[in-house]
Structure formats: C-alpha cells, structure tokens
Image (cartoon, rainbow, N blue to C red):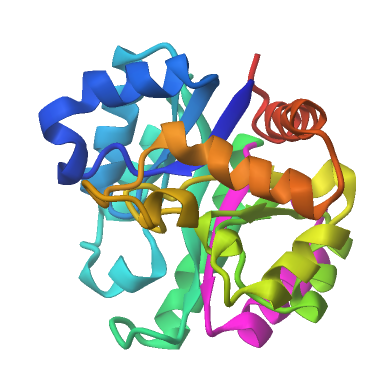
Amino acid sequence: MWIDTHCHLNEEAFAPDLQDVVERAIAAGVRQMLVVGCTLASSRKAVELASQFPALFAAVGIQPNYVAEAQPNDFAEIEQLARDPKVVAIGETGLDRYWDFAPIDLQREYFVRHIELSRQRGLPFIVHCREAEADTVAVLREQAQRGPLAGVMHSFSGDLATATACWELGLCISFAGMVTFKRNQPLRDVARVVPADQILVETDSPYLLPSPIKNEKGPKRNEPAHVRYIANHLAEVRGMASEDFAALTTANARRLFRLV
C-alpha cells in the first residue's frame, strides 16, 4: 500500500479523466492521495475533490510563486478552508529564488503566516523550496524557537546539509520523481540516510514523471499511480524490500497527516 503525499489532481491536466486517474491509483495500491493547493482557487478545488473521493485529502495554501497575485482576503479564506475535516495540511508554502514571480520578503511573510496557521489548526505544513535552501532553513530555525515544527520538505532536491537541518528540526523529507533521474546520484545519497521515521514519497503529479515512465512512449503526464516507481527506486537505494518500504512510508504519512 502506498500514499501519494503530494499531487495536484486539482489542475486542468486531470479534468478530462480524473475518475479514471483515481481508479488507476487505487488499483496500483495507492490508497490515499493528498491534493495540494497553490492558490486560493486551487485550494478550493482540492477541498472540493476531497469531498467527492474518499481516497483524496486536501492541503490548502498559497505557493510562494503566487503570493504576489494573492488578493487581500485570500489568506483569510485559506484559513476558513483549513477548517474542513478533509484538510490535513497547510500549503504548499515556502520560498523560491528560481522564479522571479514574487519578492522574497513577501514570500517569507506568507511562509511564516502558513506556519502560524499550521500551529493554530494543529496541522502539518508543506514546504516548497527551490534554490532558497539557506533562506528556508533560516525561517524554519526561527520558527522552531516559537514551538515544535510539524511539516514536510516536499519534492526535496537539496543537499545533505539542508536535509539534515530540516530533519533535525522535526520535518519529514519527501522525494518525488527527480530521485529516479540518472544524473541525480547526490539526491539518492541523501535519500539513503534520511531517518526511517521521516521519509515520505510523492509524485507531485502532473509534474516530475519518474524515469521508468519518462522513457516510455505515450503521454508524459505524471499521476498518483506512478508513485510505486519512485517508492520502489527509493527502496532499492535504501536496501529495503519494496513491501517494507511501503509499510514504512505509509506509517510515516499516516502519522504526519493523521490519516486513518
């Protein structure tokens, strides 16, 4: 059994065949999927989908690349959405220096607001970090002074020092399709040593198609059913049987997001 801890089934890429996508995932052993918001609109959609499909749960937030577009009342509405019983996380949030879509100070302000909301609601937060590792760790360390952190570094692509800093602060480390890419041996080296109770797996679909699928002919859209390719690759990296790694990551996800 697998849990896809981060996917974007709320995007238009899945609109034509969402029912089939969910059914394929369940048939492939993916019992639960976390649909993550990046804007107020996509957060609303995540909650809507979670209400329609028993296997889906939602995370609500405004991703750093969209904070400059947010309207004055958007975050207040995110706070209201966070009260829905199928919302199990806040985010995605964080910092991004790769794209120049929002001032870093504004990103940092929203990052802190999301962490504060996660504390208020007793929910973990989901961190997006792209070429902003030092800034992200600095915010997390500052926030850790105000109380324990519960969250996950999603689609982790950083180095060992960043991963170590994050797991020492209590965060989980989640790996997506990038860990299967041939050129990403350094990332696999990080995945090998993440503490057993802090590793998660995700697809980040429709993005980051894992190598076993990427190299095949046909559509190039990632989807939750493909989480097994990422997880099996990670199991091999960590010298574990696939069944044992499935049980491990499922237990970790259920504990972090309080899934049953």
Q: Residue furthest left?
A: 16
Q: Residue at x 48, y 61 (%)?
A: 93
Relative to residue 222, is residue 30 depicted above or below?
above
Question: Where residue 129 appears, x then y in whole percent?
Answer: 54, 72
Q: Is 240 positioned to the left or the right of 63 in the image?
A: right
Relative to residue 135, is residue 5 depicted above or below?
above
Nearer to the camera, 91 or 184? 184
Question: Where residue 213 appears, x then y in whole percent?
Answer: 40, 48
- The quadrant in which residue 18 appears is top left
**Quarter that holds the N terminus:** top right
Q: Is residue 1 magenta?
A: no
Q: Residue at x 41, y 86 (%)?
A: 98
- The quadrant in which residue 176 appears is bottom right
> Visible in this render: residue 124?
no
Nearer to the camera, 117 or 87? 87
Q: Residue at x 72, y 79 (%)?
A: 159
Magenta-drawn segment = 123-150
- The quadrant in which residue 187 appears is bottom right
